[in-house]
Amino acid sequence: MDPLNTAPLPADHFMPRTDAPTPDLAVATRGLMKRYGRQIALTGLDMSVPTGKVYGFLGPNGSGKTTALRLLTGLLRPNAGTISLFGKPYTWHDWTRLFRVGSLIETPSFYPYLSGAENLDVLSASGPPTDKRRIDQVLEYVGMSGRAKSPIQTYSLGMKQRLGIAAAMLSDPDLLLLDEPANGLDPGGMVAMRETLRYFTAELGKTVVISSHLLHEVEMLADVVGIIDHGRLLREGPLHDLLEAAGRVRVRVAPEDMTKAAAVLREFAPDRPLYGVDSGDQAGWFTVGIAPARAAEINRALVGAGIYAAGLEPGSDLESIFLELTGRTGTVAAPPTAEPGPPPMGLPQ
């Protein structure tokens, strides 16, 4: 056995939470660690997913999201830490507990020559006893009833993704873990998925953990958000509270005024990043990290500098919070220089 996989991780890698998981949490991890050889993927992950809610699990590529979901489904074993499911400790030995968990981790795989319904029939035999009528029900949930008898090889990427979500729902689980479920879906498919997951939680009392890079979709769907980077949870809490605490004002100026406007706007929050977009349909928009109640002050300051706002939106957005917490730049306005020219801003990646 590779000693790197069993050696303890340095204690200063994290400050573990000391509170015990409570019965009202569908998922709770405490000090969860995972490494691949010398590469540390999770460094003391502490996440708490309340029952009956949609939990948005967010993070940059390589932050540890998929590793965490694999640990929750028993596909990986942690190097340290604990996992609780439905208020009780969970280990990979207790595999029958996973009958209450449905998952879609990365790209779903199916038998190409079988139909969608036949694939679900095969999958139903590998879990708890499933009523055959459940196959028709989950296909209807994801809008695939009309293609249930078509071979998988005729499906588009979005259709395969819908079928993957249906497969995750097949055993009528209490907890649904979805890794990038909107991958390949068209706008109509994303709306349908959102409605289905809302029904799953609001009407049936189930719990959903959704990992996605589509922050706008998560903002429209999630009740609770956890933001992870470098294998550690940076922020977690009700989405409404996070947006309210991280006050933002969005203001739009003419693209040619962006350099001058950046100098004015920076004075409102000198200790917080200033985000601006200098290209595309969103060119000219700035996001300023101050309370929405101060929007009028921003407008007056811009007018005083001879700059007239083309748009002003008090409020906050999940993307700005994400960028600030993870330290991702790309749209951060640089300090003004003596030489003329626009600040180095760009569309967030």
Image (tube, helix red, strand yellow):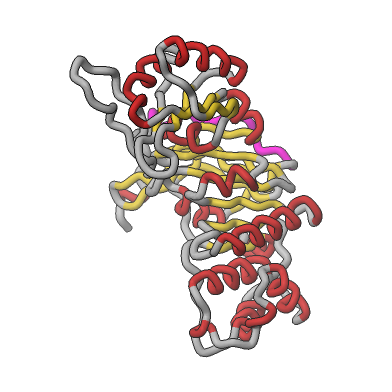
**Residue placed farthest to the bottom in the image?**
113
Which quarter of the image is occupied by the N terminus? bottom left
24 in magenta = no
The quadrant of the picture occupied by the C terminus is top left
Q: Nearer the viewer, residue 135 or 21?
A: 135
Q: Residue at x 30, y 24 (%)?
A: 334
222 relative to 269, above or below: below
In-image side of 180 versus 101 (left or right): left
255 left or right of 130?
left
81 left or right of 55 in image: left
Residue 30 seen in the current view: no
* Residue 341 picture location, percent across and down: 23, 26
Magenta-span inclusion, residue 18: yes
Closer-to-camera residue (63/269): 269
Q: In the rendered view, would you say 269 is above or below 226?
A: above
Q: Residue furthest left?
A: 339
The relative height of residue 79 versus residue 123 in the rendered view (above or below) is above
What range is drawn magenta here? Answer: 12-23
Q: Is residue 161 visible?
A: yes
Rendered residue at 57%/18% (across/down): 295
Image quadrant in which you'd find residue 237: top right
Q: Nearer the viewer, residue 189 or 56?
A: 189
Q: Which residue is depicted at the point 61% across and 51% down?
A: 209
**Residue 77: image location, x then y, percent:** 47, 55
Q: From the top left corner, tell me how far across and down residue 324 is, in percent.
A: 44, 30
Q: Nearer the viewer, residue 276 or 77?
A: 276
> Would you say the magenta stretch is mainly helix, strand or loop?
loop
Picture coordinates of residue 108 (x, y %)? Answer: 51, 70
What number of labels is visible?
A: 0
Locate residue 132: give its quadrant: bottom right
Residue placed at 60% from the left, 42% from the top? 219
